[in-house]
Image (tube, grey):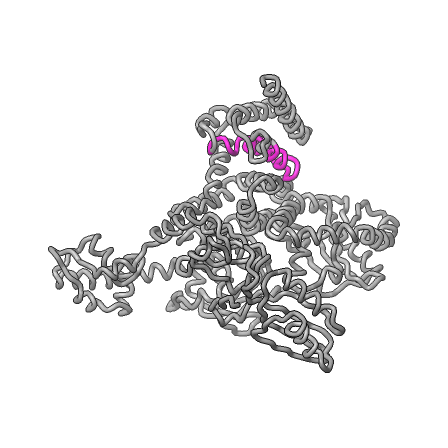
């Protein structure tokens, strides 16, 4: 026994040493002896702190911080301080080590970053019912973007390693973490300019949220690799020869598109894999000096278009106007000799390093760069978060929109260039210029033409804003602004107006309570709120002031010694948000696993979500709602990522049991060449051959092509797959696919029938 323990310890030590040496190999040549000593000290502190801890995979926990530090150093290009912080990122949260000890061992800078990393861990702790505290934690975290961006960069390294080692966790944990990653961390990596990490996070998320589709795309990419390689070599050969002839120093190669981007085209655009031609992009990377790189990139573009014809609509010039995250390049799409469109990216080595390592590389080159777009974006985020109010999910959503959004460029009347989010309106632009201008804006002139506030801006527009001192924000503005800053300032202004109006309502209530000889106490105030079914005193006072509530209704209440006595039925009907969450948690404890159509589920109130219409055989989960019991969703439901990321504690593990006498409503889309008798052939397969019931059928035909939608009852996915295969085999049918969503106007869940 002792020999076995000793052998295990030796094996663990060898494994730890291997990972530690791998980290040291990533250090830059200019790393000093003191730097290496500090890294060694951080490693030893982490090693001692985590010595009795293991990961779910069974390996020593210290392997995780070592690998996070390696990602931070090698794949993001961070400095020695970041490597030290990566090694220590879990010690304060998981062990007895304090920030004071870390500051004593190292310095204030390291302690500050580790503190930021510790705070991040609570962001997605949605078991915490205190949403205002959660929102505050989130704001504090994101404000570190401005204080020290390395907090976010190390956290991205941490998340990437967690995603790479997700196999050892249970399925429900995998879904939660993958959804979280897709919801926030992938777009965060995108905004930081870490495109390689963003792509890997998206691919790994898809691997766990839709494993079958992920494997299918990966298999098809592997099968077509030889064919793609031949096409790439044939495509780049004439480019290479001509660039060499012109004495360019360059590298050219083909880069495959990510599995997630291919998945998006299949799912969102309905394009079959076989018809996705841009499965790769060609990159041309130039060795050029900062003074000549722009001219050299355009010269390469000119050479390229001498060989292949470009698409005039697909030129993207991020040389003249770099993206907010510092990305610079020329993108164009050209027609190959075989009739396929090919995307070509042209950039210098400096631009390439910024594209691969984002912010970390940007700071390296910052002294030589006049572009301050990154600093502007950081300040904008700081302003949005400083003014943010409301629950944590609103804060997350506002920030996420800023992460995901593409940009357009518009001009002021004086010709100054401004960046705004794609889809932004004239009112959004007014708030981007200044909050005070936004509040007073009454309209705008776009390219000298008068437009309303809701007018959507386009790339290159010149915008003149019109203001009036009589203008004030109103709630309708929230319907057409899209930027986080505009929404935040409008909400703040409306809240302030509401607070002023609410003061009149408060005075009216106090007067009424005095007339009815009721105490003006907090206890009575809560009872009045419950009676009128409002959630906050401000809402109560405001509704009284605008005559939405009639205080005469209080005449019906009993008063005993100045205290209100509510009717029993009213008291029982009202639940506070915390009561609801407690009820949800209790239900989750009792129903750890829901068996649909099984013995466990007949006593549980559940419905099938109309947004994805799950049928037996689908990978599903239960979502515990406040008023409609449990709703069953498919894991690839359009709403699944947000539900799992935002409300993970309401997710119920769910599986099917065999019940062949129950039919479930789903839908299929069919398209093909219109022909006499084709509809009859389709319905014959459904009702004649397979004996299935249809709820609705609709077909439309135009220019010889038809498209049909059929809502149909099936027993499970195998029966649905059989039906799709049979319909696809009919002559004239070009495509058959499952149709997830019912009529958007029908909010009722259809009951499964025999």
Q: Between residue 102 and residue 131, name the one nearer to us.
A: 131
Snapshot quadrant of residue 63: top right
Snapshot quadrant of residue 710: bottom right
Q: Between residue 268 and residue 99, name the one nearer to us.
A: 268
Compared across the picture, whether 697 is left or right of 255 comes to left
Please say whether residue 375 is visible from this viewpoint.
no
Magenta stretch, residue numbers: 67-93
Q: Where is 317 relative to 248, above or below?
A: below
Compared across the picture, whether 194 is left or right of 676 comes to left
Q: Main secondary structure of the magenta part?
A: helix
Instruction: Report x, y in % for residue 191.
Output: 58, 50
Snapshot quadrant of residue 332: bottom right
Is 80 part of what is drawn in magenta?
yes
Instruction: Report x, y in % for residue 310.
Output: 77, 62
Which residue is depicted at the point 52% across and 74% down? 450
Q: Where is 214 relative to 14, above or below?
A: below
Instruction: Report x, y in % for residue 5.
Output: 59, 20
Q: Where is 166 relative to 284, above or below?
A: above
Q: Where is 260 relative to 677, above or below?
A: above
Please say whether residue 349 is visible from this viewpoint.
yes
Taking the view exactly as shown, the residue that stands out farthest to the bottom is 676
Q: Quadrant of the N terminus?
A: top right
Instruction: Report x, y in % for residue 99.
Output: 45, 30
């Amino acid at each position: 026994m002792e020999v076995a323990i000793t052998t295990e310890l030796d094996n663990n030590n060898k494994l730890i040493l291997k990972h530690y040496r791998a980290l040291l190999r990533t250090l830059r040549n200019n790393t000093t002896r003191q730097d290496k000593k500090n890294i060694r000290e951080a490693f030893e502190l982490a090693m001692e702190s985590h010595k009795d801890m293991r990961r779910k995979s069974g390996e020593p926990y210290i392997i995780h911080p070592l690998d996070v530090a390696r990602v931070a150093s090698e794949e993001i290009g961070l400095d020695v301080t970041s490597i030290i912080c990566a090694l220590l990122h879990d010690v304060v949260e998981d062990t007895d080590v304090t920030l004071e000890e870390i500051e004593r061992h190292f310095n204030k800078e390291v302690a500050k970053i580790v503190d930021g990393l510790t705070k991040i861990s609570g962001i997605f702790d949605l078991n915490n019912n205190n949403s205002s505290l959660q929102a505050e934690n989130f704001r504090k975290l994101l404000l570190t973007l401005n204080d020290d961006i390395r907090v976010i960069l190390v956290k991205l390294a941490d998340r990437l390693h967690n995603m790479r080692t997700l196999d050892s966790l249970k399925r429900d944990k995998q879904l939660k973490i993958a959804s979280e990653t897709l919801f926030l961390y992938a777009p965060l990596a995108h905004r930081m300019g870490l495109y390689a990490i963003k792509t890997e996070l998206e691919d790994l998320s898809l691997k766990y949220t839709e494993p079958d589709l992920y494997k299918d795309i990966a298999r098809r990419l592997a099968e077509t690799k030889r064919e793609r390689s031949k096409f790439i070599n044939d495509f780049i050969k004439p480019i290479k020869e001509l660039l060499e002839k012109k004495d360019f120093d360059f590298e050219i190669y083909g880069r495959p598109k990510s599995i997630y981007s291919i998945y998006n085209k299949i799912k969102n655009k309905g394009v079959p894999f076989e018809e996705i031609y841009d499965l790769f992009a060609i990159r041309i990377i130039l060795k050029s000096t900062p003074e000549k790189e722009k001219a050299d990139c355009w010269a390469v573009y000119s050479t390229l278009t001498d060989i292949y014809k470009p698409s005039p609509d697909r030129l993207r010039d991020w040389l003249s106007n770099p993206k907010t995250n510092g990305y610079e390049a020329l993108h164009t799409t050209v027609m190959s000799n075989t009739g396929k469109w090919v995307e070509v990216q042209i950039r210098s080595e400096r631009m390439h390093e910024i594209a691969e390592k984002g912010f970390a590389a940007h700071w390296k080159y910052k002294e030589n760069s006049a572009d301050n777009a990154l600093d502007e974006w950081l300040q904008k985020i700081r302003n949005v978060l400083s003014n943010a109010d409301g629950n944590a999910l609103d804060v997350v959503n506002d920030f996420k929109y800023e992460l995901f959004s593409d940009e357009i460029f518009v001009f002021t009347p004086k010709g100054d260039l401004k960046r705004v989010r794609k889809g932004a309106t004239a009112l959004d632009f007014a708030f981007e210029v200044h909050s005070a201008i936004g509040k007073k804006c009454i309209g705008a002139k776009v390219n000298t033409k008068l437009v309303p506030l809701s007018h959507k801006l386009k790339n290159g527009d010149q915008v003149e804003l019109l203001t009036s001192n009589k203008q004030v924000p109103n709630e309708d503005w929230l319907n057409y602004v899209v930027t986080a800053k505009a929404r935040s300032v409008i909400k703040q202004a409306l809240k302030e107006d509401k607070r002023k109006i609410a003061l009149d309502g408060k005075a009216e209530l106090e007067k009424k309570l005095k007339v009815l000889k009721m105490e003006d106490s907090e206890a009575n105030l809560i009872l009045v709120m419950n009676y009128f079914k409002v959630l906050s005193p401000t809402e109560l006072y405001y509704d009284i002031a605008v005559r939405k509530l009639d205080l005469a209704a209080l005449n019906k209440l009993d008063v005993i010694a100045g205290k209100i006595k509510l009717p029993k039925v009213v008291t029982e009907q009202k639940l506070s948000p915390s009561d609801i969450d407690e009820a949800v948690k209790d239900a989750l404890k009792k129903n750890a696993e829901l068996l649909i159509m099984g013995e466990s589920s007949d006593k549980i109130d559940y419905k099938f979500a109309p947004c994805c219409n799950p049928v037996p055989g689908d990978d599903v989960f239960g979502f515990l709602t406040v008023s409609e019991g449990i709703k069953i969703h498919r894991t690839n439901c359009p709403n699944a990522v947000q539900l799992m990321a935002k409300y993970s504690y309401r997710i119920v593990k769910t599986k099917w049991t065999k019940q062949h006498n129950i039919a479930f409503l789903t839908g299929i889309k069919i398209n093909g060449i219109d022909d006499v008798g084709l509809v009859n052939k389709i319905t014959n397969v459904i009702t004649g051959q397979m004996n299935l019931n249809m709820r609705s059928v609709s077909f439309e035909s135009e220019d010889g092509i038809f498209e049909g939608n059929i809502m149909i009852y099936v027993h499970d996915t195998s029966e649905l797959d059989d039906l799709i295969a049979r319909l696809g085999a009919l002559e004239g049918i070009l495509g058959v696919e499952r149709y997830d969503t019912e009529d958007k106007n029908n909010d009722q869940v259809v009951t499964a029938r025999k």
